[in-house]
Image (cartoon, grey):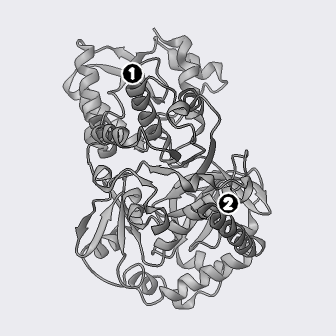
Amino acid sequence: MKTILAKLLSKFISKQEQAWITNAVEEQEKLLLNLVNTAKNTKFGKDHNFETINSHQDYTKAVSIQDYEDLKPYIDQVREGNKDILWPKTPKYFAKTSGTTSGAKYIPISKDSLPYHIKAARNALLRYIMNSNNADFVNGKMIFLQGSPVLEEENGIKMGRLSGIVAHYVPSYLQKNRMPSWETNSIPQWEEKVDAIVEETMTENLTLISGIPPWILMYFEKLQERTGKKIGEIFPNLQLIVTGGVNYEPYREKMNQYLGKKVDVIQTYPASEGFIAYQDQLGKEDLLLLLNHGIFYEFVPVEEFGKPDAKRLSIGEVELDTNYAVILTTNAGLWSYSIGDTVKFTSLDPYRIVVTGRIKHYTSAFGEHVIAQEVENALKNTLEKYKATVSEFHIAPQVNPVSGLPYHEWFIEFKEEPEDLERFKNELDQQVQNQNPYYFDLIDGKVLRPLEISFIQDNGFNLYMKSQGKLGGQFKLPRLANDRNIADGLQPYIK
């Protein structure tokens, strides 16, 4: 019965979705004016003369592109319990995410925006059912690897990780199929939590698993250690993996090795700021941009981002194969907010995207969002304690080590090496933990092991840049990467 109902619902929702897909430009234009009109009496609306805005052009003149630091004074007022600051009344939740210059960020989720997070996740599954004509997985167990649903509260507003918040909203018709148990899901220590999930689930009829790739891999690794079997043998009816949060591609090979059989994968693009896109075609990696889900989008060509006169394009003005910074205006009270991601359009009918990277270089293969300022501060503090001189460095994630847990690999060219390399390395790792609480969580939860240092020969970075045709003052080596392209290029220059 569940299978039949799921197939019928998938057809109904697909037809419903087609209405906005066909009229995406008009939907976005109406949405912007609706958002502005709804918030015109908030403090932000009054400060930015929302009552005078009648078009996207008016809006760009009234509201500049914002980052978290720009909105922080308003968010701080909301956290103090004040109403009608960014959006009418107060948010239902704050999603806590990794910060840049100010520690953790608090991203508002309103009663208006929350349903779209749930709806988009549901529709991603229904679109898969529609495309594959397969709904058998709804009859088996579904594992959601997510943050703890135990939430903090501040001045009447609950807060926690986004995945922990949405755990409260799993539809009732899936509750009997959902795993792990609420008690296990609430375990704060990640390694202990995964062990408990293994014990709870290893004999179940698992048909779907959802989570970010490194979490899924850690779960699979522990299952295989416990049973000595491939995941496909443990769960012969596993049909679907739903993933998001970080790029899936670096994990694909290792995932397939664990599975030992073909399993369909749906990639999604959820963010605390809103659910942005999901994969709507089987076998294709681009994602359908959700243009009627409470988010008005602007796109800034990457080469113009940060300039006072940068173009801010609405959806009807974008072009294929151009790298754009993504700017969001949402029904939770984020106004022309830069989320830091960059995308390219692969299709304009419907609008589909691929995520191409970040405006600023970072390392976040495991969801930690370690940024340049944090690693530079960590290195500075370490050098103050252990005398050494660093000429250049680069950091890349090692997702698939030959053995042991993944880690951050630091490629460092020392002009003067520290006397005690082991202490230097340990201190450096501790300093990064001090700078970034999510990196600390991953180390403490044994999702990652402490960083490793690869020593680059004298002048090695210059030799690498020369090999790339990028030696010169106008070219700068990125300090951080979210892949191993530069790391692989540095291999000939390791001592």
| Label placed on residue 250 | none
Within the image, what quadrant is residue 26 found in? bottom right
Q: Amino acid at mark 2?
A: Arg
- Given residues 210 and 83, the one toward you in this image is 210
Q: Which of the two discs, 1 and 2, sits closer to the camera?
A: 2
Estimate the x, y position of residue 433 in percent, counting from the top left: 28, 38
Measured along the vertical axis of the image, is residue 293 above or below residue 47?
Answer: above
- In this rendering, the count of numbered labels is 2
Estimate the x, y position of residue 459 in percent, counting from the top left: 49, 14
Q: Residue furthest left?
A: 385
Residue name at image x 29 percent, y 73 percent: 157
- Element carrying mark 1: loop
Estimate the x, y position of residue 66 in percent, counting from the top left: 48, 66
Residues at circles 1 and 2 in contact by the CB criterion of under 8 Å: no
- Given residues 360 and 448, the one toward you in this image is 448
Residue name at image x 67 percent, y 76 percent: 28
Estimate the x, y position of residue 340 in percent, counting from the top left: 52, 54
Whole-angstrom CA distance, mark 1 to mark 2, is 37 Å
Q: Residue furthest top?
A: 495
Compared across the picture, whether 448 is left or right of 210 comes to left
Compared across the picture, whether 323 is left or right of 175 comes to right
Residue name at image x 67 percent, y 71 percent: 13
> Is residue 64 at all visible to an observer of this figure?
no
Q: Amino acid at mark 1?
A: Gly
Which residue is under mark 2? 127
Measured along the vertical axis of the image, is residue 160 above or below residue 157?
Answer: above
Graded by Cα atoms within 10 Å as few (under 14), some (14 to 19) or many (20 or more), the crowding at tag 2 reads: many
Which residue is under mark 1? 404
